[in-house]
Image: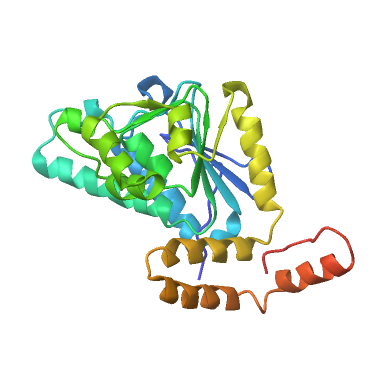
Amino acid sequence: MSVATINLATPYQTLALSSPFEGLLVVQLNRPKVANALNTTMGEELIQVFGTLEASPEQFRCVVLTGAGETIFCGGADLKERDGMTDAQFNTQHYLFERMARAIYDCPVPTIACVNGAAIAGGLELALSCDFIVASDNARFGFAEVKRGIMPGGGGTQQLPRAIGVRRAKEVIFTGDPFDAQEALSFGLLNHVYPKAALYDETMKLVQRILANAPIAVRQAKKSITFGLQMDMRTGMFFEVEAYSRLVATEDRMEGIRAFNEKRPPKFTGK
């Protein structure tokens, strides 16, 4: 049975894929002339990329999701494409976007949103679907859906309260008001804020720290955190033991012990 793989040479219409160094996949939203807005094709292509990673996570050990250009990460759904849609067409597209958000959220390997500018509405939901977010100091955030007669529907009402607390999230969503990078940092939405010129380099340093570790161990830790938070504490602790047990027979566990005793950096192979 053939295993699905990601081919960096595949000509995507709305994405640009690259691998600056081994183990890292950079997924760039590539519609800069329209604020990297989400259209149907982008939803389909993101599902394809992240669905492939879910099926065969050993291809890459970390994913960075970012946007083309220097001022916009993603401005949300492409409203020009939505203009004139029937209710049925709107619902069909929105279901696609729901699947897209879940595909990113379900990615087994660590995902970092590198927010290089405004992340509004669906753009913020894309970032929230990642494991954590780093941003440039010129980044802006917000859920403006209530100003358009709708509400966040790509995980925003679930992800944001878990990230910044229920009361703060309600204020953000009910008002539709934007907020800047420093506010986002103070809310707990962001892990780091960097000067715009340093964002990419600092993100790569963070990626290298993740890639230095055993890939199966990182994936199992992510699984334990993600699913454990959906359980009561006692059940979550049992789930953690099951995730931990998967690592006992790996070559990487044995290599980690050998490297410690031999006082050298470990050489993990993901086996």
Q: Quadrant of residue 241?
A: bottom right
For residue 233, side relative to residue 196 (left or right): left
Give me the residue at 83% from left, 58% from top: 265
In percent of width and height, residue 126 lies at: 39, 41
In-front residue for pair 10/40: 40
- Tell me if residue 35 comes above or below residue 209 in the rendering: above
Q: Nearer the viewer, residue 87 or 127?
A: 127
Image location (x, y in percent) of residue 141: 38, 30
Question: Going by the picture, which residue comes out furthest to the left?
Answer: 87
Residue 88: x percent and y percent? 11, 44
Residue 204 is situated, as x and y percent measured from the top left of the image, at: 65, 38
User: In the displayed structure, does residue 15 sit left or right of residue 246?
Assistant: left
Tell how many labels.
0
Determine which quarter of the picture holds residue 75.
top left
In the rendered view, tell whether residue 171 sits above or below residue 213: above
| Residue situated in front as seen by the camera: 116 or 93 | 116
In the image, 86: left or right of 167?
left
